[in-house]
Structure formats: C-alpha cells, structure tokens
Image (cartoon, rainbow, N blue to C red):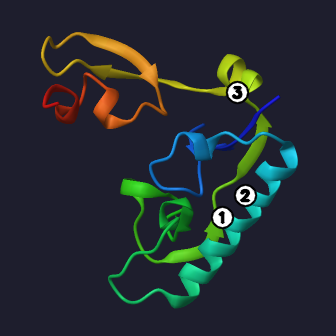
Amino acid sequence: MTFVIYRTDTTEIVSEKDYSYSGQIHKTEGHAKASLTRIKKKFTEGLAKKRPYGTFKFEGLGIHENGKTGRQAEGELTGEMVDMKIVDLETYRNKIEAQEEVTNMMTGKKFKQSVNTPNFMSPACESYWSM
C-alpha cells in the first residue's frame, strides 16, 4: 500500500521535493508522516527567515491575513498552514481527488482533469502545445 499527503482545501497532492512525481508517493504511512513533519518544519524555518518581498519554499501552503492561500491571498502570512492529511493512494484516487473543468487551448472545448495535472501535460496550457 502506498500513501500521499494532500491539502484538504484543494485536494492537491503535496510533496517536499520539487518536480518529482515519485516524491509524492510514499511506500509506508510512517514515511509519509515523516515527510509531512519535514514540510511543516521547512515552512516554519522559511517563515522565520523571510525577507520583505522574498519568497520561500512551501509559502503557498501558508494562510494569509485574509484567510486565503495562493493567488487569492492578501496581506502578510499568519504563520498558520493549510490542513493536510495522509491517506492511501487508492482511497485518494477513488474518493478524494478533485477534478477541475478547464478549456482546451486549441479547440475551445471544455474538459475535466485532475487538480494534480502538471501544466506541461494539460491541453489547457501553452506549454503542452509547445513541446
């Protein structure tokens, strides 16, 4: 059985590694718990060392003054992180993972894809068509 860490607000998979699909899937629940602990530690360390107008890894997991994350965020970080949970991969794929409706960039037709689809693999993004 394999496990993943996901955000409860968007259902996106969280990984402590950059651009690594293999880093998102953990062989044991203990490994996933250790990874989640490292993510929280790196967030706390990054927040403590943050410079004005600077960014740090996992900043996107932080909650801002308006209670939002990502592009909708306004104001300073509060120091809190979004809720994250660990679940086995089969349960995640079958019951939790959200789908988003996007528009194919070339045809204009709408279709659904996983919230975890990288831009370079989505027909809704320019990088998909430029490869």
| Three-letter amino acid code at the position of disc 2 | Ser
Q: Position of residue 19 (x, y in %)?
A: 44, 49
Give the residue number, with chain letter if any, for mark 3. 92
Q: Quadrant of the N terminus?
A: top right
Looking at the image, which is closer to me, 41 or 20?
Answer: 20
* Left or right of 126 on screen, residue 110: right
Check disc 2 and report its element: helix, strand or loop.
helix
Looking at the image, which is closer to me, 42 or 69?
Answer: 42
| Three-letter amino acid code at the position of disc 3 | Tyr
Q: Residue at x 13, y 31 (%)?
A: 130
Category of crowding for the residue at label 2, using alpha-carbon neighbours closer than 10 angstroms: few (below 14), some (14–19), many (at least 20)? many
- Pointers 3 and 2 in contact (CB under 8 A)? no
Relative to 19, say whether 116 is above or below: above
What separation in Å lies between label 3 and label 2 (alpha carbons)? 17 Å
What separation in Å lies between label 1 and label 3 (alpha carbons)? 20 Å
**Which of the two labelled residues, at mark 1 and mark 3, occupies the earlier sequence position?**
1
Check disc 3 and report its element: helix, strand or loop.
helix
* Left or right of 72 on screen, residue 27: right
The label shown at residue 35 is 2
Instruction: For residue 9, say whether it is visible.
Output: no
Give the residue number, with chain letter if any, for mark 1. 39
| Three-letter amino acid code at the position of disc 1 | Ile
Relative to 61, say whether 30 is above or below: above
What separation in Å lies between label 1 and label 2 (alpha carbons)? 6 Å
- Pointers 1 and 2 in contact (CB under 8 A)? yes
Q: Residue at x 42, y 61 (%)?
A: 73
Relative to 55, say whether 124 is above or below: above
